[in-house]
Image (cartoon, rainbow, N blue to C red):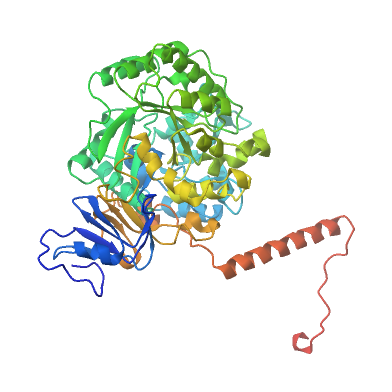
Amino acid sequence: MSTMPVGGVTPVAGAAEGADVVLRNARIHTGDPSRPSATALAVRAGRITAVGDDAEVAAHVGPRTRVVDALGRRVVPGLNDSHLHVIRGGLNYVLELRWDGVPSLRQALAMLREQAGRTPKGQWIRVVGGWSAEQFAERRMPTPAELNEAAPDTPVFVLHLYQSAILNRAAVHAAGFTRDTPDPRGGQIVRDRDGRPNGVLLAAPSALILYSTLVAAPTLDAADRKVSTRHFLRELNRFGLTSAVDAAGGFQSFPDNYATVIELARDRELTVRIGYHLFPQTAGQELADLTRWVRSVRPGDGDEWLRLNGAGENLTWAAADFENFSEPRPELGSYEGEFEKAVRLLLEHGWGFRLHATYDETIQRDLAVFEKLAAEGHFPGGNRWLFDHAETVTPASLERIAALGGAISVQNRMSFQGQAFTDRYGPQAAAHTPPLKEMLASGIPLAAGTDATRVSSYNPWVALHWLVTGRTVGDLALYPPDQLVSRERALELYTRGGARITGEDDVKGVLKEGWYADFAVLSHDYLTVPVEDIAHIEAVLTIVGGRIVYAAAEHEGLDEALPPLSPSWSPVARFGGYQATSPPSAGVRQADLLAEAVAEGEQHRQWRATRGLAAPQQQPATLDPCFGP
């Protein structure tokens, strides 16, 4: 009956229709204002049938009920990433060496060196997102020379944010870059004194040069894509993620690149609920693609596991700004004509959409098109639409978005790019990027996510850490206290907030009777741990629709078996995904603070000594005979 020894719980006499699962002895944060906390819940047929204390829920235990003892751990609604490139991430996961969470460049290069010895000839090593130079103790990126030393013969591609990529010599050769290769529009191939590519590619400001180079690397066959996606979904379950809204993206074509998740849904093997978007791939053919799609299907016609949510995050390529904060804001050409046609087409066919817009200047231009259509009665028209990112949106634009019935999905890109933004625009501008408190005050539906996997990490607790603390992965404080979000509000943005984007906020994101049985039992109590430790949280048990999809610690082995990782040389097979680090103890944290103080004192002494303001350090005189010669 039970998954663990559970004393004092016996099936109710004659209870042939008991619950499938009962969770007890928990500290449940329900997200339901009418009953914000509980200690137990019951699940049947994928939905919650009871929420209450242990005694109340015990009445739902039948002879076939699996009883799970949470051992007093915190339980939260399943997390829902409102902007995650989950489909593309799954297709490539087992091919990628993840530096997410790695604390030093030295360790990262050691991983790279070891993987070079495991990777067969003809394959690449690729590090694609989830890390920043700011997270490393060395506070810098690797150099092409270091990649050459670590992997002299195996092509290595390392993507750093939306800014650049570093390649070793083997990858430069495999990608076909030569002295005669011209710089693509919006990108730069950095060259040595002889004009040869030196291994550095720059987004200036377009990241197309980075992504088009990555496309040259080998891909998986259909069977391995399925295995890769299942393991990636399990990795998301590891952090309590139960739903995600896929924002499509460049080089993600429909239906080819969606075939894997469609097959997994058909076989009932998805462990994350996915609402997906369609993104026209070819500039100049966007309207033809959209026309073909809107005549074939309506958003929302899928099921609770896989459903089309609309178009975007680009509708027309010309309307998309870039997100490389190391470069100036791009000046976009005229795009309003085709953009208006695309939006009108979607609205007339009942399609929602999402729009990539980093800067307020882009948002203002888009809103002008929407207001023109609003004069014809199209806005607000019942279709869900939203802006993604919106880092520099202004109060005036927020008022216009609210009037047109729009929503916003924010991501923690500033966790990884906050230093670059601050260096370019200054700390005062960074303190309101994005303006979260103003967004919340506007009444606009707001959701949170990561924009993983090519820049931010897919770990949702890194994003929640950013929302609550306002700090980057390099511990730069971006926001003043009055701009920070409470833990409860941040969690709501990451649960029910994501459900708003897909129109499922009446069945998902809250633990109450009749709603989806999606929840996570956490390794640490999100509501009480020191704020700096939020990023270290993982799930020990994740349940989606009543299915145990991830289990660790005292629940290890209760989740569904996965097929073996393939190919066998996969970096994930050796290193796993996100590199977990444990929260430091209070004693360690205190010692770290003392070490910082000592280091600062020593640096100051050395500064004074080099200027003749202090004598060079000498060995202290021996005062205790115990320490004498």
Q: Is residue 275 left or right of residue 113?
A: left
Q: Quadrant of residue 415?
A: top right
Instruction: Give coordinates of residue 216: x percent, y percent.
Output: 39, 33
Q: Residue at x 44, y 48 (%)?
A: 491
Q: Residue at x 37, y 35 (%)?
A: 501
Place residue 324 in its image quadrant. Answer: top right
Q: Residue at x 28, y 41 (%)?
A: 225
Question: 502 above or below 566?
Answer: above
Residue 36 in the image, given as x and y percentages of width and height: 39, 54
Image quadrant holding the N terminus, namely bottom left
Q: Relative to residue 295, is residue 398 depicted above or below? A: below
Given residues 317 and 338, the one toward you in this image is 338
Residue 107, given in percent of the width and then of the height, sits at: 52, 56
Does residue 293 appear in this view? Answer: yes
Where's the C terminus, which quadrant? bottom right
Query: Which residue lies most toward the right here?
Result: 612
Let me know if residue 563 appears in the view.
no
Q: Residue furthest front?
A: 34
Q: Position of residue 82 (x, y in %)?
A: 40, 39
- Name above or below for residue 1 compared with residue 216: below
- Specify whether 220 is left or right of 477: left
Query: Between residues 500 and 353, which one lies in front from this camera angle?
Result: 500
Q: Nearer the viewer, residue 258 or 574?
A: 258
